[in-house]
């Protein structure tokens, strides 16, 4: 089956320019024209599961399905690997919504693919020509912006374009280009990227076991930004690779300095790693090089990975995890309890630490159900020989429940909020010399 159809269909893999010309003619001749931008959700996961070649065949079948259902005058073209444009001449918003709903519904039905039964889902962005939107290029871009919005809302839905989306897309593009610049200059003095540190303490002794490095962007234009505002953009644009390398390098440099501040006791640093970094070839090389450069023993570095990052492709992740563990760098499973771990696989991974997600810790002092869940996770971690850390500990009552249930370590605002590196170094000196604060954690 080809990738474009209809009486007036452009050729397969129709170049965007040709599609634009065709659309421009339609806009000029029809009272209204609707453009649907259609994409199969999670195509990467499908490619991973059945291979790229088979994945491509699935996409061709999707094109065939779209073409067979496209109305007489509808035109469908494939404009990117996993993206199709359906043009509906004469369609108003109601017609376009009905057509989009049909597409979402059709593509979500299970279908046979060789020996597999696949269940796909699709998202659709809709733009309809109007007095203000009369040119083909903008209409196509608007439908794409609406598609992006549909996907970020979880997919398997259609979404109309709104002006606000353009503003969001523009802000996102600006953030991306400024982030690129900030990363390029991150090695220079006065760079805009910073690592802040939040300690983890041993609940039994009150000793600091490590500090988590949390990236911040002190942007001249936007002010101090937390990771949620820019990590997703870094991940989508690929900038995360450079950002991640900078974080490892900087955290190792800081850890070397903390060794002097720690008055004998060294503090390990924990660095968060994104799924793309784990999937890159040999992430261990970056860690080894940074440790060497800063003469840091590997035991003073720990890498935090989310449960979903590891479990998404556990087979290929395992090789990288084994190499990192063999180097002597610790591995922690972050935000544990929010994803769907395969527990039999979890036990075989070289993970040293389980970090129970804040959302599970919040209610432990007021809800016996939450306390039972956390106790079960602690027991499971211990049964697998892991150190268990509770994230987001904010109250004495939560700490007390964690202590009763033999949780090993705590991290959260009760002990300290993330601090700039110099403030953290001062905090560390104070904590290590003040038995009062340490006993406070150990006995509260
Ligand atoms: P995370 O690794 O789970 O980090 C813990 C987050 O919880 C941090 O937010 C921290 O400030 C916050 N937190 C800690 N204790 C408490 C508490 O008691 N109460 C509350 N309400 N919050 C608490 P932050 O710094 O905004 O980081 C968010 C996420 O961004 C991190 O979640 C991590 O997944 C990601 N991240 C941070 N730095 C990096 C980095 O260098 N690289 C990558 N790839 N991701 C990073
Ligand atoms: Mg973390
Ligand atoms: Mg976490």
Image (spheres, rainbow, N blue to C red):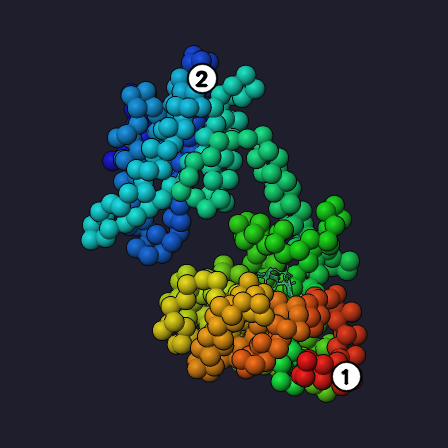
Looking at the image, which is closer to me, 274 or 163?
163
- Is 360 situated above or below 229? below
Q: Is residue 111 left or right of residue 166?
A: left
At 23% from the left and 53% from the top, the residue drawn is: 116
Looking at the image, which is closer to me, 144 or 55?
144
Location of the N terminus (image quadrant): top left
Q: Is residue 219 left or right of residue 382?
A: right
Location of the C terminus (image quadrant): bottom right
Residue neighbourhood size for the residue with mark 1, other residues' Cα within 10 Å, grouped as few (<14), some (14–19), many (≥20): few
Q: Secondary structure at mark 2?
A: loop
Residue 65 placed where, x, y %? 27, 35
Residue 174 placed where, x, y %? 65, 42
Q: Is residue 245 left or right of residue 120?
A: right
At 30% from the left and 27% from the top, the residue drawn is: 70
CA gap, disc 2 to disc 1? 74 Å
* Res. 35 image quadrant: top left
- Is 294 situated above or below 418? below
- Is 367 situated above or below 56? below
Residue 423 placed where, x, y %? 78, 69
Please tell me whether mark 2 or mark 1 is closer to you in this view: 1
Looking at the image, which is closer to me, 193 or 242?
193
Q: Which residue is mark 2?
A: 32
Is the distance from the Cβ of mark 1 to the nearest ligand 1 atom less than 8 Å? no
Q: Is residue 352 visible?
A: no
Residue 428 placed where, x, y %? 75, 77
Q: Which mark is residue 436?
A: 1
Residue neighbourhood size for the residue with mark 2, other residues' Cα within 10 Å, grouped as few (<14), some (14–19), many (≥20): some
């Amino acid at each position: 089956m080809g990738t474009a159809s209809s009486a007036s269909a452009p050729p397969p893999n129709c170049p965007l320019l040709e599609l634009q010309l065709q659309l421009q003619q339609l806009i000029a001749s029809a009272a209204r024209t609707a453009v649907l931008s259609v994409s199969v959700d999670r195509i990467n996961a499908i490619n991973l599961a059945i291979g790229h070649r088979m994945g491509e065949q699935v996409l061709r079948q999707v094109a065939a399905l779209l073409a067979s259902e496209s109305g007489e005058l509808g035109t469908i073209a494939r404009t990117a690997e996993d993206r199709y444009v359906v043009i509906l001449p004469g369609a108003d918003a109601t017609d376009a919504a009905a057509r989009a709903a049909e597409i979402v519904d059709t593509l979500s039905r299970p279908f046979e693919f060789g020996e597999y039964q696949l269940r796909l889902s699709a998202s659709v962005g809709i733009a309809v020509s109007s007095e203000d939107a009369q040119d083909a290029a903008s209409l196509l871009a608007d439908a794409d912006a609406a598609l992006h919005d549909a996907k970020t809302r979880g997919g398997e839905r259609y979404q109309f374009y709104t002006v606000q989306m353009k503003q969001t897309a523009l802000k996102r593009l600006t953030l991306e280009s400024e982030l690129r610049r900030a990363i390029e200059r991150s090695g220079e003095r006065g760079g805009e990227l910073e690592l802040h540190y939040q300690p983890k303490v041993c609940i039994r002794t009150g000793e600091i076991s490590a500090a988590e490095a949390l990236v911040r962007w002190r942007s001249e234009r936007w002010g101090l930004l937390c990771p949620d505002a820019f990590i997703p953009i870094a991940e989508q644009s690929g900038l995360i690779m450079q950002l991640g390398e900078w974080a490892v390098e900087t955290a190792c440099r800081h850890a070397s300095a903390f060794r002097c501040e720690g008055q004998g006791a060294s503090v390990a640093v924990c660095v968060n790693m994104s799924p793309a970094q784990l999937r890159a070839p040999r992430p261990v090389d970056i860690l080894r090089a940074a440790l060497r450069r800063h003469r840091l023993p590997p035991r003073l570095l720990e890498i935090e990975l989310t449960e979903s990052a590891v479990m998404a492709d556990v087979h290929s992740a395992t090789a990288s995890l084994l190499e990192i563990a063999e180097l002597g760098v610790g591995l922690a499973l972050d935000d544990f309890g929010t994803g769907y771990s395969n527990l039999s696989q979890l036990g075989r991974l070289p993970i040293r630490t389980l970090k129970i997600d804040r959302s599970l810790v919040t209610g432990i002092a007021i809800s016996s159900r939450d306390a039972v869940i956390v106790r079960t996770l602690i027991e499971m971690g211990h049964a697998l020989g892991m150190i268990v850390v509770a994230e987001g500990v904010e109250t004495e009552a939560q700490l007390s429940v964690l202590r009763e249930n033999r949780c090993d370590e705590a991290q959260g605002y009760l002990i300290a909020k993330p601090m700039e590196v110099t403030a953290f170094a001062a905090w560390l000196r104070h904590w290590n010399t003040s038995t009062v604060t340490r006993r406070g954690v150990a006995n509260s």
